[in-house]
Image (spheres, helix red, strand yellow):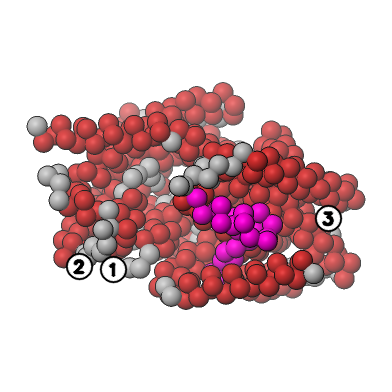
Amino acid sequence: MAIKTFFKVWVIMAKNNLQSRLLTPTSSMLFILGKLFNYVFSVLIIFSIFNQVTNIKDYTMSQAVIITLVFSLIDSITQFLFRALYQFRPILLKGDFDLDLLKPLPSYFRPIFSAPDFLDVPMIILQIIALVFFLLKYSLIPNFSNLMMFMMIMANGLVLAFSLHLIIAAFSILTTEIDSLVMIYRSLGRAAVVPTDIYNNFFKIVLSYVVPITVIFTLPAKALLAILTISGIFYSFVFTFFFLFVSLWFWSFSLRRYTSASS
Amino acid sequence: MSFAKYIRIAKNTLQEYFVYRVNFFFWRLQVFIFFVMFFSLWSAISTGKSNLGVYTIPQIYSYFVIGYIIKALIFTTRTQDIGSDIQNGSISTLFIKPISTLKYYFARDIIDKLFNTFFMFFEFILILFLFKPSFSFPTRENFIYFLLFLILSIITFFFYSLVISFIAFWSDDAWSSRFLFGVVFVTIFSGQYIPLDFLPTTVAQILDYTPFPYMFYYPLKIWLGQVPSNIIYGKLFIGVLICLFLYFLSQLMWLKGKQKYQSYGN
């Protein structure tokens, strides 16, 4: 019942957000163009690299392309779902967050879920089409069980992405700094444009265990390519559970220290 | 006397950084992470190979490490503040002060570059310590051309960034044009992700007619000694023309923009 209510509120907020985007069509178009250029060039860079080499570590070009496409798709979905975090700092500084805490919603609803970014929707559609196209082109169509595994690991990755966003939001309550933290997350996330196991040991450890970008982006792609091991599946769920627990604990820890910044 | 005003502005800008220390630390950290990511990626790609395209492995490492240094000099800027200052009307207070608005932003820009370069120096030492990259060094002649191109790149990017910011006089959102032209185009087309000669020839040729390769790619190619001296003069000439074009465009937009500018509220 509660989830139904949250979803209802989310839909209302999403509609409001969409309306505000439609009020500024030129700037919305520029944003979409920027995302499109980023996407096209990410794929072009992979092709350009494979013009020089035949494989990167154990990955062939077709696998690397699919991993890049899955990365871009999941990145757009997380941007769509959790964009509100980017607008949280002014809310904190003005003291408006007090008003949200009075509402019968989870305290993290406003900073994480309140502003889904509809400018990512055209990209998500395009990315799904491109992913299907390249899976067909490279004859890498997954069977039903691999497809289900991909969906499950991707959903699990989205829960982990939520946890990382919540940790950033909690940190911002303590420090009021958020923009650069989000940028750090984005920079680390961008590392998953290629399979994260190609990196050297130290960076691989950071991406796998400290900020487990691997779980969010690389493991779903591996599931789709049917190269995900049982230990990978286990690692994916254990880390998501651990980070979800830590993020919720850290969020309530931060909330206890929250002092209204405004009057 | 008039110069002293801008020294004061620069000092005030510096003090702002010390107010938001954590923010600055995280900013530098994300720039560093971005470098580590690309260095690690190219390191993985070059494993077991003696060269990639026209680049030897030390040249590829130099491209990204020297690129990291010149990024702090070229692309750090405070001119992005102009867009939001136009949008929220706070630029009005600058108009009524006895200072040149553009010199005000230039003073802030200079201190931003110096401050970032100062921290970049320590990060560079950390890079040498952590990655021990093999380097390719330029000849004395190429080093002089590199410095010339670097100065040109800094000035070109300053005027380019001004042009993007002045779009805010005519648009409803300053950040969208900055995102497309100032972030996406600059990072992709200037060669920060990949040396441009790795891209398909047609794409690289088209990009040659834009300002972007002159901001990052060509200074590095000159460092690596991959631009013959007879072509360097041509590239410098085109770079100067692009810089002049952006200068005049920024001046025109500034004049027209001020005529259109309206400030509301209190």
Which residue has dot 3 on it? A227
Residue shown at 55% from the left, 53% from the top? A97
Sequence-wise, which precedes: disc 2 or disc 1? 1
Q: Secondary structure at mark 3?
A: loop
The quadrant the N terminus of chain B occupies is top left
Residue A25 in percent (x, y) is at 43, 75
Chain of the residue under label 1: B
Which residue has dot 2 on it? B260
What's the distance in space between the residues labelled 2 and 1, CA to CA? Answer: 8 Å
Disc 3 residue type (three-letter)? Ile
Please state the extent of the stretch shown in magenta in the rendering: A95-120
Q: Report whether residue A92 is seen.
A: yes
Q: Is residue A18 left or right of residue B102?
A: right
Q: Is residue B10 left or right of residue A141?
A: left
**Res B170 label:** 1
Residue shown at 76% from the left, 66% from the top? A3
Chain of the residue under label 3: A
